[in-house]
Amino acid sequence: MLITTTDHGVTAVITPHGNVDHEALPALLTAASSELPPTVTHLTWNFEHSGFIDVAGLHLLDQQRQACRIAHRTLTVTGLSRQPLRILQLADELFPAKHWRDFLPSSQPLTAF
């Protein structure tokens, strides 16, 4: 999987190119943890080039939510196509306490503070 990370000082965008699944998860987690400088206060995961996300994508988002809270970063998710949107909707219906709707487009960015 190709993963593009752009850093603009206080903001960074991570864009996976391909399916977000169990095989891709280690590389995605590495991209988020090792490539971001501590000056980044706003992280965006852009999924416009990922047409498929399975439960590994849910694990990624949950882990990133926790990591951003610890690092005092704001987390935003963009570019969700039909299938990734649907898996987030299903996850929110089945497990509402996990607040999966926070990642849906109508939600505001997740504030880490």
Image (cartoon, grey):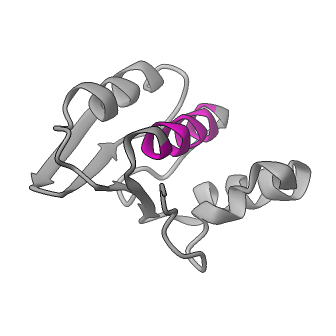
Q: Camera-side residue: 48 or 63?
A: 63
**48, above or below 33, in the image:** below
Residue 32, horizontal then vertical, whole percent: 32, 34
Magenta stretch in the rendered image: 56-69
Q: Is residue 109 left or right of residue 95?
A: left
Q: In this view, does 87 lie to the left or right of 106?
A: right
Residue 37, horizontal then vertical, whole percent: 16, 38
What is the tally of numbered marks visible in this picture?
0
Residue 61, horizontal then vertical, whole percent: 55, 43
**23, above or below 61, in the image:** above
User: Residue pushed farthest front?
Assistant: 113
Q: Residue at x 80, y 57 (%)?
A: 92
Residue 106 figure quarter: bottom right
Verify whether residue 65 appears in magenta. yes
Q: Which residue is drawn at 49% across and 45% down?
A: 69
Q: Is residue 57 left or right of residue 11?
A: right
Residue 75 figure quarter: bottom left
Q: Residue at x 22, y 50 (%)?
A: 40
**60, above or below 14, in the image:** above
**32, above or below 44, in the image:** above
Verify whether residue 113 appears in magenta. no
User: Residue pushed farthest bottom?
Assistant: 106
Residue 46 figure quarter: bottom left
Is the N terminus in the top left, top right, bottom left or bottom right quadrant?
A: top left
Q: Is the magenta stretch mostly helix, strand or loop?
A: helix
